[in-house]
Image (tube, helix red, strand yellow):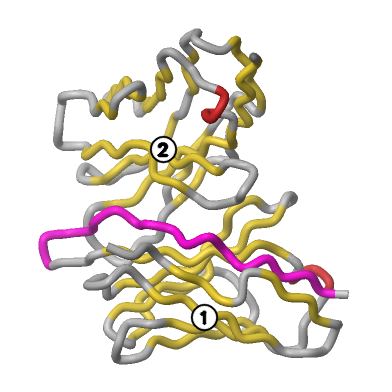
């Protein structure tokens, strides 16, 4: 069974600063996907970024980037130039590439951007 | 392309009643997954449907059931509602191929309150 751990229940950062959210996971799979989802107060779960395990290059999406360390089973999210709209719960999630497996979520990190 | 839609968005029921929630996936997506989100338990997987067949099921009692129609729309039903069923129910769709999984995109959720 896969597990995803987010050790930071809450974080806060000043607007325009950079913040890094941590995520570690445990799996025996070699092919899998990792995701960061954002859930603002509206409760809509929004995809932030996705990483395929077979790709060594870290994924980036505008101000969002990841540091994917496969051997260490670590998948952190870096938000640069943070904005008020980044205030949300952030969930790290894992799913094997193949098979009838479900998406496994971490417990989430509540991020607050301070004006 | 329209996103995942869920109806209704809000629902209030009383204990013992039953409820049906609906989810329409993104056009072309044939996989639909359901999740329950509560403050205490976090995000928990309910079940996944693909081409009208249940592919995977979470650890929920038999009161929770689902189905998928030929147009990929999915419904989940909860019978004999209990107070603990109060939650946000999220539906996610993805494009599943023999080459593996694609990203799951979430709907806005249905917030169920059981009194």
Q: Residue B31 sits in which quadrant? A: bottom left
Magenta span covers which residues?
B98-114
Q: Position of residue B27 (x, y in %)?
A: 26, 72
Residue B71 within the magenta-colored segment of the rendering: no
| Quarter of the rendering occupied by the C terminus of chain A | top right
Residue B49 x/y as whole percent: 37, 78
- Please tell me whether mark 1 sits on a helix, a strand or a loop: strand
Mark 1 Cα-neighbour bin, 10 Å: few <14, some 14–19, many ≥20: many
Which label was assigned to residue A36?
Answer: 2
Question: Do pointers 1 and 2 mark residues of a single chain?
Answer: no
Q: Nearer the viewer, residue A10 or B45?
A: A10
Q: Residue A58 appears at what percent x and percent y?
A: 22, 24
Q: Name the residue located 58 percent from the left edge and 54 percent from the top edge.
A: B43
Please state the chain letter of the residue tagged with numbered disc 1 in the rendered image: B
* Residue at horizontal 29 percent and vertical 52 percent from the top: A96
Q: Is residue B38 above or below residue B70?
A: above
Q: Nearer the viewer, mark 1 or mark 2?
A: 1
Locate residue A35 relative to residue B15 in the image: left or right.
left
From the top left corner, tell me how far across and down residue A105 is, in percent: 49, 47
| B35 relative to A110 in the view: left or right | left
> Is residue B50 positioned above or below A20 on the image?
below
Spatial distance from mark 1 to mark 2, Cα to Cα? 25 Å
Residue B99 magenta-drawn?
Answer: yes
Q: Residue A101: which quarter of the image?
A: bottom left
Q: Residue furthest right?
A: B115
Q: Is residue B110 left or right of residue B1?
A: right
**Which numbered marker is on residue B22?**
1
Is disc 2 placed on a helix, strand or loop?
strand
Query: Which numbered tag is attached to residue A63?
Result: none
Q: Residue furthest left?
A: B99
At x 32%, y 20%, the residue is A67
């Amino acid at each position: 069974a896969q597990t995803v751990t987010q050790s930071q229940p809450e974080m806060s950062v000043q607007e325009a600063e950079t913040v890094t959210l941590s995520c570690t996971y445990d799996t025996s799979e070699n092919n899998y996907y990792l995701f960061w989802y954002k859930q603002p107060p509206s409760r809509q779960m929004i995809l932030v970024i996705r990483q395929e395990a077979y790709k060594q290059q870290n994924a980036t999406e505008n101000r969002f980037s990841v540091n994917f360390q496969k051997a260490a089973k670590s998948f952190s999210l870096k938000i640069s130039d943070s904005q008020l709209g980044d205030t949300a719960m952030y969930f790290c999630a894992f799913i094997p590439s193949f098979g009838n497996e479900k998406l496994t979520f971490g417990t989430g990190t509540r991020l607050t951007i301070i004006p | 392309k329209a996103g995942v839609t869920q109806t209704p968005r809000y629902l209030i029921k009383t204990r013992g009643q039953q409820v049906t929630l609906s989810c329409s996936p993104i056009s072309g997506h044939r996989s639909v997954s359901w999740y329950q989100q509560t403050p205490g338990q976090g995000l928990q997987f309910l079940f996944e449907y693909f081409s009208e067949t249940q592919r995977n099921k979470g650890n929920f009692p038999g009161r929770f059931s689902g189905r998928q129609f030929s147009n990929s729309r999915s419904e989940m039903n909860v019978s004999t509602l209990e107070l603990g069923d109060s939650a946000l129910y999220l539906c996610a769709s993805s494009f599943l191929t023999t080459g593996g999984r694609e990203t799951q995109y979430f709907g806005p959720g249905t917030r169920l309150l059981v009194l």
